[in-house]
Amino acid sequence: MRLIIFLILMLLVDLYVYQPFSAVIRPLGRWPRITLMALYWAIPLISVVCLVLYEAGYAHWLPGKGGRSMFTALLFLVYICKLLVVPFVLLDDLRRGVQYAITWIGQPAPHLPGRSRFLSTLGLGIGLMPFVALLYGMWRNPYRYKIHSVKVPVRNLPPSLEGFRLVQISDIHSGSFTFPEPVENAIRMVNDLAPDLICFTGDLVNNRSEEMRPYIPMFSRLKARLGIYSVLGNHDYGDYMRWPSEEARRANFQEMLDTHEKLGWKLLRNTHDRIGTEATSLTVVGVENYSAHPRFPKYGNLAQALKGTEPDALKILLSHDPSHWEAEVTEKHPDIFLTLSGHTHGMQFGVEIPGWIKWSPIQYVYKQWAGLYNRGSQYLYVNRGLGFLGYPGRVGILPEITLLELTGADPEGASLPSKES
């Protein structure tokens, strides 16, 4: 029944948007007009056939995971962009209705005016612009990795830690990858940075731990002088799946824990680890997912993770959700100088021109959503994510590899310039 309702709504949108479409192409020659009309109706026809086959369970001959992801994204884009046209058609219908009423009052034979070519063209243009941008983002940007190099000033930094190189990656979402080969490039880029430490801040998968199986050999090649530390993200618990039994849910989570071990990453679950020598040590603290937003889980226990740490130790906190920083870290734990988070993906859509503008719709949900933030001598870095989720692309917000270099703070403790490459 839900599928039938959805298909009816699709058809209504198609019929309504077809009206300005036909008005715009009317002046064209016969064959160009027929070709464009055929293309217009081919998309909903193919969509209906695929949706019915998926629902009926006869989709074995259709493309695999990558093809389904592309199909879903394209279907979503087409109809979102068509919905952007609808207000212009409504405005045109209002104009026509008013003009018809005027002629009905003043003339015995009222005439319904034709569609406005201007409003039809404007509406289709408005709908076409985001479609082209999002289509480009799917084709060009899902694997176009960008290195963000940032210097983090640290008060009382031991001279031996000056220039310490920490690489952060986050939000791999291996279940969304359609091509493994481009991901190899990300592994090479990380290793070429010669990091002292690598930190992963959650979301290996979308829903199931098995999604990471094909990529374990690839990501196990990541290397850092002092090792790789990781935490879990909200997608890593399997909470967004309907499992046939509690045993299946537990088995999935156990596979997630085993995956980190196979990767050679040290998973911190409300625990900490001290690395380096006595004179140059850092304490890496890792919590399970903790969010200030009610829709996401609160498994993290920062007090437990910090238990046994020295008050004056240099502490780096790995916490998947950046809302945790203001919820607990800045007020209660001033001894944590750097928190690393991910989760937001920068919404995979926005505008970033360094020194000019930094905007994404996600900023209306998360105050700290991408890049470096500070409050006094405490810092938060929010990684834009290595992978993608839902929309298989990025527009304006590219997948990120972060290089954080520790440096002695200036007398005011102010943040130092950062660069991007």
Image (cartoon, grey):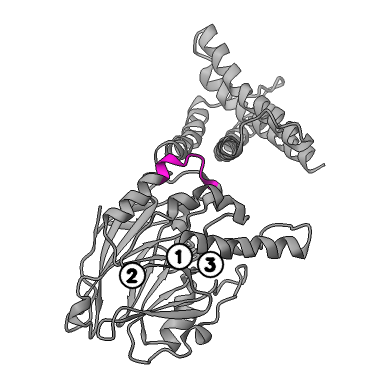
The residue drawn where x is 72% and y is 21% is 108
Q: Mark 3 or 1, which is nearer the eye?
A: 1
* CB within 8 Å, label 2 to label 1: no
Query: Is residue 276 something that shows in the picture?
Result: yes
Horizontal placement of 400 versus 125: left or right? Answer: left
Horizontal placement of 185 versus 214: left or right? Answer: left
Q: Which is nearer the N-term, disc 3 or disc 2?
A: 2
Counting from the top left corner in percent of width and height, residue 79 is at 60, 37
Q: Secondary structure at mark 1?
A: loop
Distance of label 2 from label 1 (alpha carbons): 11 Å
The residue drawn where x is 60% and y is 17% is 38
As drawn, 329 above or below 256: below
Tag of residue 226:
2
* Residue denoted by label 1: 265
The residue drawn where x is 78% and y is 43% is 2
Q: Residues within 10 Å of mark 1 (few under 14, many from 20)?
A: many
Q: Residues within 10 Å of mark 2 (few under 14, many from 20)?
A: few
Q: Which is nearer the N-term, disc 3 or disc 1?
A: 3
Question: Which residues lie in the magenta part?
Answer: 176-183
Tag of residue 232:
3
Horizontal placement of 411 versus 275: left or right? Answer: left
Distance of label 3 from label 2 (alpha carbons): 20 Å
Q: Mark 3 or 2, which is nearer the eye?
A: 2
Q: Amino acid at mark 3?
A: Leu
Query: Is residue 390 something that shows in the picture?
Result: no
Looking at the rendering, in which quadrant would you find the N terminus? Answer: top right
